Image (tube, rainbow, N blue to C red):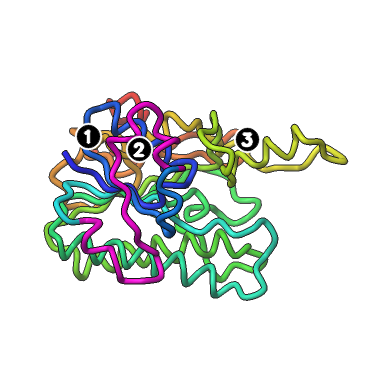
Amino acid sequence: MTTLVTGGTGFVAGWCIAELLDRGHTVRTTVRDARRAAQVRAVAGDRGEELEVVVADLMCDDGWAAAVDGCEQVLHVASPMGEGAEPKDPDVLIRLAREGTLRVLRAAVEAAVPRVVMTSSCAAATPRPGTDGEFDETLWTDPDQRGLDTYRRSKAIAERAAWDFMAERGGATTLTTVLPGAVFGPVRSAGTTGSVDVIGRMLRGMPGVPRIGLTSSMCGISPTCTSAPRPTRRLRESDSSPSATSCGCRRWPTSFGPGSARPRSACRGGPCPTPRCG
């Protein structure tokens, strides 16, 4: 099976690539700059030479048709993180997330790729502050919520755009979205940023203990990257997918707030028998 992983220089993408290669997949990945191909192959470890690296930018149509050509599935992992502080122009980050996602989906649909798995974020399914209880796949972050940071807005808007596109033009291609929280684990390259940089900053020394609201949304890198290629582990999933779980599960539930439970209502027909969903 040939799988495309977008954003090969990223933390999660690097682990997805390594996992897929270990399973015997033929793997292709994208980078914005061809000079980073050697870095990506090094991240893949001993099997790096088996990795095909192609150039494609989320903000440019060039290269995407070739990137998805012959693929049975696409793992769309690439997404802008920002640089920590709020951007001067929030629309730049939002446009990159939204248009990049649509560009990948459009190429996959036109190439008749059977399956696309998109790494979204629990930032796209976050209740308003102070909300407690059980939540399922129908929960969406309100992008117009006062005080919402640009990164969270970009994730919600990009995933909404993905589902709207698939509803209108998805054809036989199915979409699954995985919504992890902050992802931690061993780094595979010195240039890794994102969630793991929080740990790096603590190790380098901070003037105080930061208040980081991660207690209910932390994910290990192994469950996150292995959830993407396996059809029995999913969050939001298009209803027409032929690879739905036996229980009809549409979401890998996430809990929010102190004492909140992981909802079983996401599994149609009662409690989900699948251990990963329960």
Q: Is 86 above or below relative to 114?
A: below
Which quadrant of the figure has residue 166? bottom left
Q: CA distance from mark 1 to mark 2?
A: 9 Å
Disc 1 and disc 3 in contact, CB within 8 angstroms:
no
Give whichever of discs 1 and 3 has the lower sequence position.
Answer: 1
Please report whichever mark, 2 or 3, sits nearer to the chain's N-terminal start.
Answer: 2
The numbered disc on residue 16 is none
Q: CA distance from mark 1 to mark 3?
A: 34 Å
Q: How far is the residue under mark 2 from the one under mark 3?
A: 28 Å
- Which secondary structure, mark 1? loop
Q: Secondary structure at mark 2?
A: helix
Q: Which residue is mark 2?
A: 17
Contact (CB < 8 A) between labels 1 and 2? Answer: no
Residue at the right extreme? 207
Identified by mark 3, the residue type is: Thr
Location of residue 163 in the rendering, given as x and y in whole percent from the top left corner = 31, 62
* Front position in the image: 161 or 90: 90
Q: Position of residue 28 (x, y in %)?
A: 28, 46
2 vs 3, front mark? 2
Q: Residue at x 30, y 62 (%)?
A: 104
Question: Residue 195: within the magenta?
Answer: no
Judged by depth in the image, the label closer to the viewer, 1 or 3, is 1
The x and y percentages for residue 209 are 81, 37
The residue that disc 1 covers is 25
Residue at screen point 73% across, 40% down: 201
Quadrant of image for the N terminus: top left
User: According to the image, label 3 marks what residue?
Assistant: 215
**Segment tinted magenta in the rendering:** 39-68
Is 12 situated above or below 114? above
Q: Earlier in the sequence, mark 1 or mark 2?
A: 2
Q: Residues within 10 Å of mark 1 (few under 14, many from 20)?
A: some
